Amino acid sequence: MPGEDLQVYVDQDLCTGDGLCVQLAPQVFEFDVDGLAYVKDAAGELRTEPGARVAVPAHCVADVVESATGCPGDCIFVESADGAPYAGPLAKQSPA
């Protein structure tokens, strides 16, 4: 739901470097020198440590969810505050 506290992370082992996420939500995603997407924190700092999660800004929720659902590498994971899958590969596997 909009306004819900969401977190997002990218699994670089699955990232194809397609760039859909960087185009849709540049405030949250950015390429590093390796050509893979990573998340950025609220200060705009690239978080390159494996499994790094950042909060999804409220104004970016729709773009981040679209990035996760449209990612060809299925590497973007959006979770609710309790850790439940919200969008991305694990959410696709969850019962409706």
Image (cartoon, helix red, strand yellow):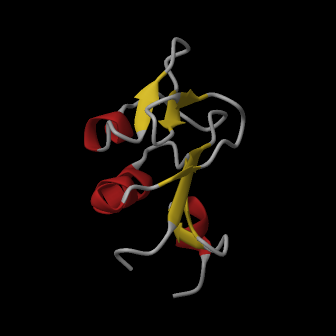
**Which residue extends farthest front?**
43
Spot occupied by residue 26 in the image (x, y as percentages of width and height): 32, 36
Residue 65 vertical placement versus 12 (above, below): below
Residue at the right extreme, as displayed: 50
Residue 44 shows in the view: yes
Q: Position of residue 41 (x, y in %)?
A: 51, 40
Q: Residue at x 30, y 54 (%)?
A: 63
| Image location of residue 27, percent across then percent down | 34, 39
Total count of labels:
0
Write the residue at 58% across / 86% down.
95
Q: Nearer the viewer, residue 96 or 46?
A: 46
Q: Residue furthest top?
A: 33
Seen in the picture, residue 89 relative to 10 is either above or below; the reply is: below
Q: Please tell me which residue is depicted at 50% across the width and 65% down the height of the picture.
A: 6
Return the residue nearer the eye: 46 or 14. 46
Question: Vertically, is 67 above or below 19?
Answer: below
Instruction: Tell me which residue sits at (67%, 70%) in the image.
Output: 83
Q: Is residue 77 something that shows in the picture?
A: no
Q: Position of 82 compared to 67: left or right?
A: right
For the N terminus, the quadrant is bottom left
In the figure, residue 52 lies in which quadrant? Answer: top right
- In terms of image quadrants, where is residue 18? top left
Please determine whether, in this image, residue 68 is positioned above or below residue 38. below
- In-front residue for pair 23/48: 48
Q: Nearer the viewer, residue 54 or 88?
A: 54
